[in-house]
Image: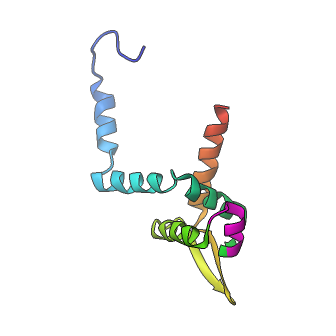
Amino acid sequence: MNECLTYEIHPHAIEEVKSKQLNQETYMAMTSLLKMISDPSRLKICHALFLHDLCVCDLQEICGMSQSALSHQLNNLKLARLVTSQRKGKNIIYSLADDHVKTLFEVTYEHVMEQV
């Protein structure tokens, strides 16, 4: 059952939570980030980059995507600051932006695997 048996508010708990709520702009930014990784193609790219820094050619082979589709997704991931790129000779190497992105992937994976 998902409802209280009696209606009784707890002012201390309500005040504590209200005092720690984020502003609407922060909630929107967090929502955008979660939407960005909710796409299976982008998540597959992130997983590949979680395991190894890769160029577009490598990612095409791993993800089974056309170069244009992959470039589109990589651009989205870069705009969301989830992925970075660096030129190495004639190649552009992609990697996850920072350890926060790795942690986000790890925690999501662990949570999903608990339910399996």
Q: Is residue 19 above or below residue 71?
A: above
Magenta extent: 57-65
Side of 72 where 30 appears, left or right: left
Q: How is the image coloured?
A: rainbow
Q: Position of residue 6 (x, y in %)?
A: 30, 10
Residue 49 falls left or right of residue 36: right
The one nearer the camera, 48 or 61, is 61
Q: Looking at the rendering, which quadrant does residue 59 occupy?
A: bottom right
Work out whether residue 90 or residue 103 is closer to the camera in this orientation and state it.
90
Question: 100 above or below 1?
Answer: below
- Residue at point 34%, 9% (across, down): 5
- Residue 80 position, x and y percent, is 46, 65
Find residue 81 and report its horizontal and vertical position in percent.
49, 67
Depth check, front residue: 20 or 40:
40
Q: Give the number of callouts.
A: 0
Residue sitting at x 61%, y 81%: 86
Which residue is rendered at x = 71% and y = 63% of the image? 62
Task: Locate residue 99: give its quadrant.
Answer: bottom right
Q: Residue furthest top?
A: 5
Q: Quadrant of the C terminus?
A: top right
